[in-house]
Image (cartoon, grey):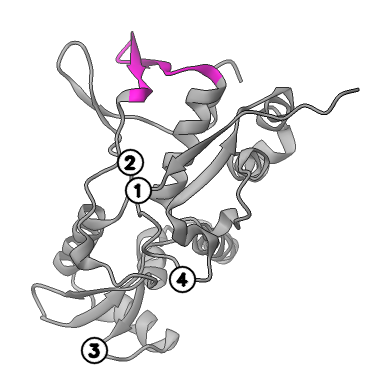
Amino acid sequence: MAEFKFPTEEIELPSKGLVYSEDNPLSSGKVEIKYMTAKEEDILSNQSYIQKGNVLDKLLESVVVSKINIKDLIVGDKNAILIATRILGYGKEYKVEIKGEEHIIDLSTLENKPLDESFITPGKNEFDYTLPSTETKITFKILTGNDELKIERELAGLKKINKDASPELSTRLKYMITSVDGETGTKEIREFVDNYLLARDSRALREHIRAIQPDVDLDYVLDGGEEVTVPIGLSFFWPDI
């Protein structure tokens, strides 16, 4: 049988590659992906992947042609690749049901958020911030797939100890914050989050991160004028699953 060459597309990352080290292929700011085939549909319907919660990562590992580590991707760049994969695989029209009514979202209209490069030191995923209430100087990073896996494992372990525990917010902050007043130790950062980080500073930090982190603008205005956030999950690719 003749060898088939799959058509591919090059995707521009919202981060422009600036948050990755120079030796990381993602620093190019572009990722090449191939069109989905029946192989990828098998991945999307794989019950083992679905139960483990890693089905979308498995999908990306299959469609990404560039020699990258999927787990190095920050969330915003991952969103951009998933949206492009969805459009190439099933088209730009995405049917969603909101408040009992069906709407069609045109995924091709979603654009990368404007990137304020003044906050970024090229090649470094670390940002400076002064907490507004206590004026504590911290640095933080944007979470990657590797960080998300570590957070999931830690939360699962905490659930085994106390099934009523719900420390997701504080746990995520412990992975985001990389230094507090120059202290970079894990013990010091965790103690700060647990005992000294004021709720108002926590909220301000999270709002700041949302404002500056590279991502796709997932806000979409429906025909009736209502603004919604486009959900990205398994049904994003295959509503019948």
Q: Quadrant of residue 169?
A: bottom left
User: In the image, is 144 to the left or to the right of 59?
Assistant: left
Q: CA distance from mark 2 to mark 1?
A: 7 Å
Q: Helix or strand or loop: what does disc 2 sit on?
A: loop
Q: Helix or strand or loop: what does disc 4 sit on?
A: loop
Relative depth, front residue between 240 and 237: 237
Q: Amino acid at mark 1?
A: Pro
Q: Are marks 1 and 3 in contact (CB under 8 Å)?
A: no
Label 4 neighbour load within 10 Å: few <14, some 14-19, many 20+: some
> Could you tell which of marks 2 and 3 lies nearer the N-terminus?
3
| Residue at image coords 23%, 57% | 212
Q: CA distance from mark 3 to mark 4?
A: 24 Å
Q: Are marks 2 and 1 in contact (CB under 8 Å)?
A: yes
Q: CA distance from mark 1 to mark 3?
A: 30 Å
| Residue at image coords 23%, 17% | 222
Q: CA distance from mark 2 to mark 3?
A: 32 Å
- The residue carrying mark 3 is 181
Q: Residue 238, can we see it?
A: no
- The residue carrying mark 4 is 21
User: In the image, is 106 to the left or to the right of 157?
Assistant: left
Mark 3 or mark 4, which is nearer to you? 4
- The residue carrying mark 2 is 216
Q: Height in image: 52 above or below 192?
A: above
Q: Where residue 79 appears, x then y in whole percent? A: 43, 42
Image: magenta residue range: 90-108
Q: CA distance from mark 1 to mark 4?
A: 16 Å
Mark 2 or mark 3, which is nearer to you? 2
